[in-house]
Amino acid sequence: MKLAVLTSGGDSAGMNALVRAVVKTAILKGCETYVVREGYEGLVRGNNTQPSEKGTPPPKQHVTAEGSFVQNLRFGDGELLKDGTGDHPSGRTLKGRYIVRVGWDDVRGWFAAGGTLIGTARSTAFRTPEGRLTAAHNMIKEGIDALAICGGDGSLTGADVFRSEWPKLVEELRSQGKITEEQATKHAYLRIVGLVGSIDNDMSLTDLTIGAPTALHRICESIDNINSTAYSHSRAFVLEVMGRHCGWLALMAGVACGADFIFIPEDPPEAGKWEDQMCRMVQNHRDVGKRKTIVIVAEGAHDASLQPIRVDYVKDVLAERLGLDTRVTTLGHTQRGGRPCAIDRILPTLQGVEAVEALLEATPESPSYMIGISENKITRIPLMEAVEMTRQVAKAISEKDFKKAMSLRDPEFCETLEGFHTTAVLDKEPRAQNHLRMRVAIMHVGAPAGGMNAATRAAVRYCLRQGHKPFAIHNGFPGLLDDLVHQLSWLGVDNWMTRGGSELGTNRKLPDIDLGAVAAKFQQYNFHALMMIGGFEAFNSLLILDNARKLYPAFNIPIVHLPATISNNVPVTEYSLGSDTSLNALVDACDALKQSASASRNRVFVVETQGGKCGYIATMGALATGACIVYTPERGINLDMLRQDVKFMKKRYSLDQKGKAEGRLVLRNEVASDVYTTDFITKMLKEEGGSLFDSRSASLGHTLQGSIPSPMDRARGVRLALKCMAFIEHHHALLVKQPVKSRQAPAESAAVIAIQGSTVKWVPVQEMVEHADMKNRRGKNAWWDVHHDLVEALVARPQFLDKS
Ligand code: ATP
């Protein structure tokens, strides 16, 4: 099969990772693979093979080594595409060529680039039947009848129109004599697959669109920077972020940056009243001593009567009514640009693989699919169903049916909005009934992880809104024994969203250092509930406290564990706070290492990652950085593997382009083997690499804890912490019905909050034990381990080792 991939509509980070994955997977499946430059416009323009000023198109530069796979290694156009002009100092040019055959190495290093290297455009010609006829002709001339399209709802609709028209177009081309009978029969139907590239995250039936997480990163970076100047001058800032019909960016940024007020299209404020409401809220915050004000306005924000809400007007309201020194910042196109974050490398890679599978399986009868993600699983969704539903949101908004608009967004969107209100609104009247008000202890256990502070801030704000008293226990269980306990305030936690590390101070010691004394302290402080944020130690602590409930009545309170660890080794949950921050820190470090590794000569960097006995961070990191080899504790390391690894590396470097230095990465989890250490592997590769390649090692160590937590970790921290609080309230309400002296907390009131896909579950700690490998401190089900094989597939390890 001949297959082409194109990017269309607005660009978004992650499109290159997608093109890379489609190209590589298609080649692995034996397809001839093409990229189409400039979106649909490239299909319409096709390949003009007339000699250009700089000469005819270059001869195809096949590598002439053995086997069919290596013949597809390079056509040499990757550099031209990267260059962006289509010209090259060598005189080679892509001028007049829009449908370009690419090989395995032509998409090398595309991961780290923002935007789309193959270009994108909005094509008026493709909107016309004549334009589409020319596009079909150009494709058939090249023998292509399978197309992967990455773009927004417009681009995907265009793809669907093209596909349904295809038989008619083929017939027309045949009757006009532009194609032969044989060509008409061979290309009787078109296979398409859609992938959503959109920074707005505005497509229904998928949890994330390609580029939205990176855009959120850019926005949060800007707001984090603005925060410090706003604080210094005690200013208010009104920020406009992208999002015409979808407030996802504004909402997520509002939560992740601890904004004071947000405006999103799906949940508009009442016309003529929102000014008072906003000023009241901002004034409340100022009254308790807040020095800065951040208001976020989505580009498409309006009030409930559909009057647009403009940033300048919001600024005037804040300045005139509250006398605040107010500035406006429109983030504009900075939101689109830049290096893709970790999710925008992993997700498009997984989706690209699935897209090729879908194209290979497509039949004339099967629907056109869009590749999405739902519940952490890559999905195929009938394309037009998703587009239709997306349009319904815009329609509902235009008809002022905002309830419907919200109902068409996923549950996470609604919960995040609720989370924003809970953490931003400063109520004067507590909501919980007097007898249900609690003294809630919050503790960090284990190593620091990004998002711990955001989760704590949300829990504290929730408590205060309800009338509970939130207490910080500093330095874990030893801190409790040392009476390092103090009550937290609304303002005291205000700046915690952006802070890495642990504001409470964390400790690895478990409560069994002195269970009796711990129980006595619980009694002394009269805690009604405990929330522990941490990794495997927190899980272990929960287990110890639950087991001790019979002996120590003080533990008969609701106790929750919110998993937060960069190792992501807590059983059952697929995701722990901090693991996204950590992956981003890894990606940043590896990009820099790869750059250094290829700057002077061929060099392999053996990068050591943290993770304890869990290979999650190494494996996902390898997927996000395109590492060649990954070593994990689950799979271990042995001599046979190393022998194969050396063979692979030698073969790989021997087939590189001459005269061009290449850097490559090997990721090794810190405890993957006691014997074959990072140092050993580095020396081995150096020795065996001979004149082909050199090697160096780098240990990322504690840098993987990251500095500023990622927006995803912050937003998830808020969402999960609020769920923890609701859980605590629920169980407390049940417990207070029991007589104080004989109070017995049920097993389910000591639980871990676990994420499985987009669903959040409560798992009683005793049930968690069944899923835990207590000796190796990790879950029994390493769901991510399948990606190990994908890492190897995407570097064509079996092919280079001639095992295909
Ligand atoms: P973004 O979300 O960034 O706007 P988009 O894919 O929705 O991305 P559009 O400008 O709507 O962007 O569409 C991109 C291109 O897709 C158009 O320029 C056009 O070539 C093609 N296209 C869109 N809608 C159709 C259609 N109904 N029929 C044929 N082609 C279409």
Image (spheres, rainbow, N blue to C red):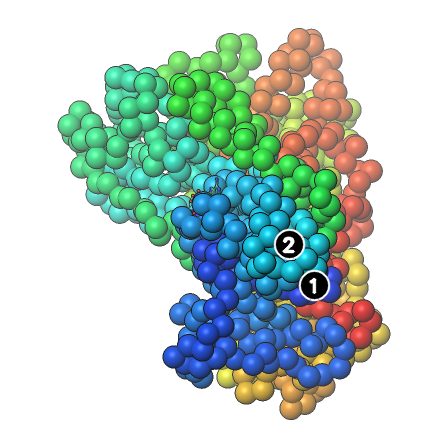
Label 2 is placed on what type of residue? Ala
Q: Is residue 732 left or right of residue 551?
A: left
Q: Quadrant of the C terminus?
A: bottom right
Q: Nearer the viewer, residue 75 or 523?
A: 75
Residue lying at 79% horizontally and 64% vertically, measured from the top left: 636
Label 1 is placed on what type of residue? Cys
Residue lying at 64% horizontally and 91% vertically, measured from the top left: 691
Q: Residues within 10 Å of mark 2 (few under 14, many from 20)?
A: many
Residue lying at 52% horizontally and 55% vertically, measured from the top left: 135
Q: Residues within 10 Å of mark 1 (few under 14, many from 20)?
A: some
Cβ(mark 2) to ligand 1 < 8 Å? no
Residue 506 lies, in percent from the top left, at: 56, 45
Residue 726 lies, in percent from the top left, at: 58, 22
Q: Can the viewer see residue 169?
A: yes
Q: Nearer the viewer, residue 18 or 692?
A: 18
Helix, strand or loop under label 2: strand
Q: Quadrant of the N terminus?
A: bottom right
Residue 502 lies, in percent from the top left, at: 51, 46
CA gap, disc 1 and disc 2: 10 Å
Q: Can the viewer see residue 481?
A: no
Q: Quadrant of residue 232?
A: top left
Q: Which residue is mark 1?
A: 31
Q: Nearer the viewer, residue 170 or 630?
A: 170
Answer yes or no: do the residues labelled 1 and 2 have beta carbons within 8 Å? yes
Residue 514 lies, in percent from the top left, at: 69, 38
Q: Which mark is residue 146?
A: 2
Helix, strand or loop under label 1: loop
Residue lying at 68% horizontally and 57% vertically, measured from the top left: 181
Using the image, determine if residue 520 lies above or below residue 92.
above
